[in-house]
Image (cartoon, rainbow, N blue to C red):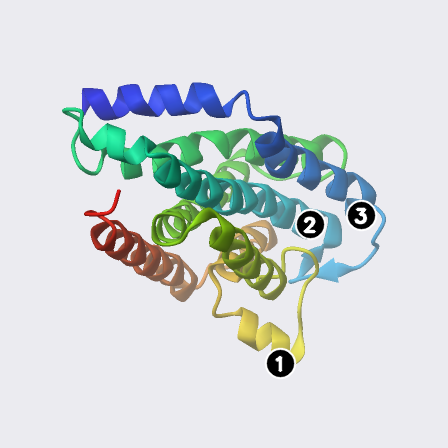
Amino acid sequence: MAGTLALTRAELMRLTRNRRYFIFTVALPVVFYLLIGKQVKTTAYGIPFGAYYMVAMAIFGAFSGALNGNAQRISQEKKDGWIRQLRLTPLPANAYVISKVLVSMATTIPSIVIVLLLGRFYGNVHLPLWEWFAIAVTVWFGSTIFAALAVAIGYRYNPDQVQPISLVAYFIFAIFGGLWFPLTGFLGKVGEFTPTYDTVKIGTDVIENVSVPVGLAIGLVVWLGIFAALATASVRATAETV
């Protein structure tokens, strides 16, 4: 375990110097919220649009960082032989995967915190303290789902294949999950089967002070199980080639 944590710290230090990563995880959701959060005067999912958009942008930043950046880096490191080098060390076989998920969980925190603070002090979203914590934890947990998906894609495919695959997944989950705008009608019904929608709806239900359906929480756990299984399958399938 000590070796895995040491690898995690090294990965974290390396990632903090990656400006592109923080542009997509922090800068973009902040800019979108500043441009749109207070300008739209309507409601979404039963709450003011500014409060909904705060939740959506917090998820957007965490989700983008967990999926897009991680998948590309994992695939490139596999190609460069970094994973093979780690296999020659005394580290456990799963140390690399665990470290990637832990790093993703750590680096999504700034995005979540900054967007929520922006919602409070710029968007005038006023909530009890426990609701802020509930939303932050929900978004944070949701990001781990896509960290697992990033491992599945990055381990399975080459770098030139990873980018289009991760972008397709990114747009599907972002659009149908209601991260850029709330969906209604048929598209809204389709979106209800995505983990991004589950995360948004839990956050907006907390703000609306209504009971959060148990099915939403179960949905997140199920999606995590699916992507974790895909990640495990990808790692095992490529065990002899990396």
Q: Residue at left 29%, top 35%?
A: 83
- The 10 Å Cα crowd at callout 2, few under 14, some 14 to 19, many 20 or more, is many
Q: Are marks 3 and 1 in contact (CB under 8 Å)?
A: no
Residue 113, horizontal then vertical, whole percent: 57, 31
Q: Name the residue under label 1.
A: 186
Q: Where is residue 226 in the image (x, y as percent from the top left)?
A: 32, 61
Neighbour tally class for label 3: few under 14, some 14-19, many 20 plus, Cα within 10 Å: few
Q: What element carries label 3?
A: helix
Residue 140 in sight from this viewpoint:
no
Q: What's the residue type where badge 2 is placed?
A: Tyr
Q: Is residue 10 above or below residue 203?
A: above
Q: Which residue is drawn at 42% across and 35% down?
A: 105
Q: Nearer the viewer, residue 23 or 157?
A: 157
Provide the secondary structure element on which disc 2 rests.
helix
* Cα distance in 3D space between marks 2 and 1: 21 Å
Pointer 3 residue: 36
Q: Would you name the residue on which mark 2 appears?
A: 53
Amino acid carrying mark 3 in the image: Ile
